[in-house]
Amino acid sequence: MSDMGKLSLLSRRTLCVTGAQALVATGLIGPAVARGRNGAPAASAVVSALSDLCSAELVAGRADAAVTGVALIADPTLAALRQAVAAGCSLVLSPETPYYGRPADAAAAAGPFAALAESAAKALRESPALEAKRAFVDQHDLTIFRLTPSNASGKDASVEAVAARLGWTRYRVPGEHPVYRPPAMTLAALVQLAHARLGASGGLRFIGDPAMRLTSVLLVPGTSEVVSTIHGLAHADALLTGDMREWEVVEYVHDSAEAGYPKALVSTGRILSEQPFVERCALALSQAFSNLPRHSFLAADPFWRVQA
Amino acid sequence: MTPRELVDLIYRKAAEVGTPPSPVPSRRDTFKAGDPDAQITGIATTGMSTFRVLRRAAAEGRNFIITHEDTYFRDNDIPDFLADDPIYLAKKAFIERNKLIIWRDHDLAHRMRPDQLFAGQLRILGWTADKIEPAPRMPIVTLPEPMTLRALARYAAQRTGTHSHRVTGDPDMIVRKVAVGVGYAFPSLPSFPDVDAIVGGESAEGSAGTLPTMDQSAFAADMTTVGRPRGIVFLGHMGTEDAPMTLVAEWLRGFVPNIPIAFLPAGEPFHRPLSGFENTLPALRMPAAK
C-alpha cells in the first residue's frame, strides 16, 4: 500500500489531507505549519509564489479575491470542490480545469466542425453536471486557477516532482530529455513502483515483457506528445507516462520488440501522473505562506477493471 | 490485379452502395509503402499495420495490407521526425525486403453507410442500434436487459476479448442505454442525456483538449455526484477498431473472388495486467452529496 493509505479517504477519486498533515504524510516537510487568517493574501499573490513552477490561468472567480484557504486538487471533480469548501478554502489550484476542457477559440468555432462543436458545447452547458458545478463555484465565491507546469527555471517541475516521488532525483541524466537511470529493475518492478508511488491500479497499463531489464526511464507526466517522446525514447529503455495516443507512441513501443530494439511503456493515467506536481506546489506555498491554510486533495485512480 | 486497381474498384463498389468518393480526397487513405502497380498475391485487412501483422502477412504470402490505422506512428504517416530511428528503419526495411504494399482504409470505412467499424463493433458486441431518425453517427443501444456497469464491463471484455480495458463510474449503477464508440471516435456524454454509459475505445484524459474534446471521465464522476450516474468502459483503440476490420475482408470477398483475403488481428498492444491488477474494483463508493 502506498503512503496514500495513511490519509483519509473522501471519495473514490479524491483523498484529502490538511495543511501540515498533508505535507508530513507525503514526506514533503517535517514540522507542523502554522495557521492564520490575518492579512489574507490575494489569489494573485498566492499563485505568484508558484511562478518558478508553472503558469497560472484564471478559470473562475477574481484574481484579487482575498484567500481564506487554498485547496490543491489534481482532479477537480464536484465532490472535491465540495470538500474544499467544507475545509474553508476559497482558492482552488489544479493542473486541470473543473469545466472538462478548454473553451473553443474563434478559429475552431468557424472551422469545418463548427456545427458539431457548437452542438456539443450547448449540450455541455445544459448538462446537470456543469450547471451544478458552476452554481457551486458561484455560490461559494470560489476562485480557481489552472496551473500548467513550466520549465521557466530550466527544469520541468512536473517531471522533477514525479522523479522525487519515485526516489529518482539523483539519477537524472544530463541532456534535453527527462531520462533517469535508477538501479536496474524489471518492467514488472517498474509497474509495481508506479502502483506503490503514484497510486495507479485500475488505470495501470504497460507494454513489454514483464521480465525485461530496464536501466533507463523517460518520464513524461501528463500526456505524451509523439515526436518529443519518441525522440526521448532513443535515450531510454522505457517510458513512464500518464496518457498517450494509442496510434502513436503505443504503436511505436509495441513495434519495438519486433524490430529488435525492445522498449517498454508504463501508463498510469494522466491525473495520477500530475499528482506529484500538485504536491510540489503545496510545498512551495508552505514555504511562501506559513500562515495560509492549505488542503491537498490527493487523486485516487479514477479507473477500475474487471476481467471477463 | 494490382493494389491500385483494387483501390479503384473499392471506390467504385462503395459508390454503388451509396458512398460516392469524397469531393476532397482523403489525406489518410493513401498508399503508405510499396509498389501499387505490383500484382497482388494475397490481401490482409487489419486494425493497425503493426510490425507483427506485417511479419504474419509476409509469412502467409499476402503482399497487400489494408490497414485502418497508421503504419509510421502518426496519423499523417509522414516519417520526417523519425530520421535514423532504428525501429522505424527496421520496419521500413522489412516492408521493402518483402515487397509489401500498404494502403490505409480509414476515412472510407467510416464514410460507408453503415460505417464499417461501428457495424463491426456492434456485431461483436451482439447489439442492435436503436432506430433513431436521423441516425446518429455513433450508435445508441438500449440493452435487452438492464445490467450493472460491472456486468456491462465484464460482458464487453468477454465479447471483444480485451484484458487491458479500463472502466470509470459506480460499478453498481444500472445501465439501460449505451452509446458505442470505436477508436478515437468517442461519443460525448453531454450530447446524449439519456445514455447511461459509453462502451468505446480511447478518449483524451484530463482537460487539456479544446471543447468538445473533454474529460469524459471527470464528467461521468460529476454526473454521478449529482445523482445521475454515468459510466464509461474504455476498451482501447484496438479493442474497438481491430476485429471490425473483418467486415472489410468480408466485403472485399464479395467482389474480389480470386485473391485470398484474410483479417489479421493487430491485437491489444498492452500486456495482460500483472497478478493483482486484473480485477481492481474501487474500494469505496462516491460520497453522498452534501
Image (cartoon, rainbow, N blue to C red):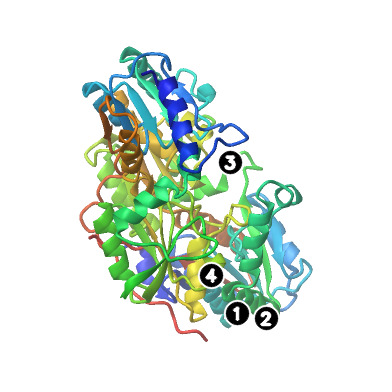
Q: Earlier in the sequence, mark 3 or mark 4?
A: 4
Separation of disc 1 and disc 4 at Cα?
13 Å
Which residue is labeled 4 in the image? A77
Check disc 1 and report the residue beneath it.
A85
Amino acid tagged 1: Val
Q: Nearer the viewer, residue B193 or B257?
A: B257
The tag on residue A155 is: 3
Give whichever of discs 3 and 1 has the lower sequence position. Answer: 1
Image quarter of the C terminus of chain A:
bottom left
Q: Amino acid at mark 3?
A: Lys
Element type where label 3 sits in the image: loop
Q: For mark 1, give the secondary structure.
A: helix
With A260 as the anchor, is A117 left or right in this view? right
Q: Nearer the viewer, residue A34 or A245?
A: A245
Q: Which residue is mark 2?
A: A140
Chain of the residue under label 2: A
**Of the two numbered discs 3 and 4 in the rendering, the one whose residue sits closer to the viewer:** 4
Earlier-in-chain disc, 1 versus 2: 1
